[in-house]
Amino acid sequence: MARIAVIGAGMGGMAAAARLAVAGHEVVVHERTDTYGGALRRFTRDGFSFDTGPGLLHLPAVQRDLFVKTGRAALEDRVGLVQVPVTARHVFPDGSAVTLPNAARGKVVDALDEALGAGAGERWSELLGRAREVWEAVRRPLLEEPLRDEPGSRGALVRDDALPVRPRRRGLLRLPRSLRPGRAPALAALADGELRDPRLAALLGSCAWAHGLDPATAPASAIVLPYIEDTFGTWYVRGGMRNLAQALYERCRERHVEFRFGTRVTEVRERDGRAAGVGPLADGAGEADAVVVGGVAGAPGGVAGGELGTARLTVLLALRGAPDDNTAHRTVVHRDLGGAGRAPVTVLQPDDPALRPEGDFGTAVLSVPVPVGSLRTQAEAERLADELLATVDAAGLGLGPRVLWREVRTPADTEAETGAPGGRVPPPALPGAGGAFLHPANHPAGSAPLPGLYAAGGWSHPGGGLAAAGMTGAMVAGLVQDPEWRGSR
């Protein structure tokens, strides 16, 4: 049995802690704030509750596996996990709109044909079919195995641009320069060349923007993002996504993980050339045989990244009137047509009585990615919030007249909660582009700053998102047990 110190009680750190504890290790989690969950926080006021981080869940199999591997009670025994009826409703600047059924490819094709014209659904489906090729090629090395750079390893594949994401040839003279063979296109360029409808291109681009990635610069391999939603569905946790963090925290406590809140760790201690604990803590409280850095950019130990992704502005709306039966859980309001341009506004309106007072009330969360450092004052954030609300109302959502009060949350609020400089939100890792969209390895063997030092959470491989955070826990637990661990079999 080893003593393990985990820095940070985010979802990645807790996933690692639970798995390590069930393997028989003594685990202590040091968290600088007064609570757990990382970005999965909750804002409450006057009987209204809001998720301030991720509002939906993808790849729930990752969380199910975590709960199966760490205790008797399954995930659904601890949280109310429901599949939302539609992936999203998209509203475009030209007034057209389309509602995409959840995890139903045939119905999606029909919906696109009806809303955007004959052939739109076929082009979208064809692109997702090619995304499946990318997914099957990189799923294991990207999401299930530690990132390695040894010659001939599958880890090299996720850096290679020679993935099955090339544009279909329709004659070189008909392809834009950025799509010609021999060049790895950006997602927006692929969308323009392949989908041949600016609304479809905007729909594809929104899948990148949702993760804080600009489709003008994100690699074309980002087509795996809509494929994941289309194939595995979109899910919600009743009572809000914060309940998922609470369930994982309780699972850690059941496995005798110790939590020390209000403990700021500023260094990883070294002894005999290995990580030997965290500090500054008195009375030997930070001594350990291994240290797991739970994922913020610039964290102690130097193993976390943080140059990718954007920040985010979030507007919480307490509303008069509950949502009607036709209100989509997620609405994406596009401010530009095409795969690039301004990021769309995402509106979440969960029909969840647990989030609102008794009576005729509702909630909505507006969010949009913003460049790091772009909102320097609260007044600037309030002006942008006004603009976003006007945009969604012009698209027909009618939220403005229903607002009782609002709370505008800036990147500074995200930074205070997660510790990420500038409030940056980590995006998921993506293959290709020479590895430019990958995150640091969980145990960078051969180039590790310190043996016995590991990384979990959104700023390490395989990046941001709840599914990826869960995978970091599995990878770290495997590597602590065996430094040559190659992934689950």
Image (cartoon, rainbow, N blue to C red):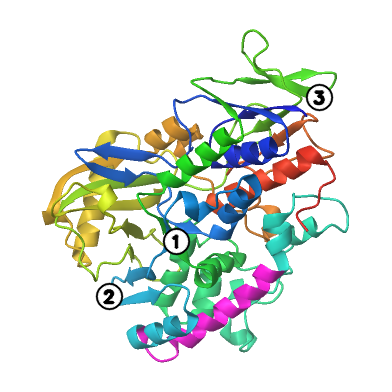
Which of discs 1 and 3 lies nearer the camera? The answer is: 1
The residue at 79%/39% (across/down) is 481
Residue 57 picture location, percent across and down: 47, 57
Which of discs 2 and 1 lies nearer the camera? The answer is: 1
Q: CA distance from mark 2 to mark 3?
A: 60 Å
Which of discs 2 and 3 lies nearer the camera? The answer is: 3
Residue 28 picture location, percent across and down: 62, 26
Q: Earlier in the sequence, mark 1 or mark 3?
A: 1
User: What residue does disc 3 label?
Assistant: 274
User: What residue does disc 2 label?
Assistant: 94
User: Viewed as shown, does residue 3 lie left or right of 152?
Assistant: left
The local secondary structure at tag 3 comes to strand
Q: Earlier in the sequence, mark 2 or mark 3?
A: 2
Residue 416 picture location, percent across and down: 42, 30
Q: Quadrant of residue 260?
A: top right
Amino acid type assigned to the residue bearing label 1 in the image: Trp
User: Viewed as shown, does residue 268 lie left or right of 404?
Assistant: right
Q: Please name the predominant secondary structure of the magenta segment in the image.
A: helix
Looking at the rendering, in which quadrant would you find the N terminus? Answer: top right
The residue at 64%/26% (across/down) is 300
Amino acid type assigned to the residue bearing label 3 in the image: Arg
User: What residue does disc 1 label?
Assistant: 235
Looking at the rendering, in which quadrant would you find the C terminus? Answer: bottom right
Indicate whether 70 appears above or below 274: below
Q: Earlier in the sequence, mark 2 or mark 1?
A: 2
Amino acid type assigned to the residue bearing label 2 in the image: Asp
The residue at 69%/70% (across/down) is 136
**Range shown magenta:** 116-136
Q: CA distance from mark 2 to mark 1?
A: 29 Å
Q: Residue furthest top?
A: 283
Is residue 127 a member of the stretch shown in magenta? Answer: yes
Categorize mark 3 by other alpha carbons within 10 Å: few (<14), some (14-19), many (20+).
some
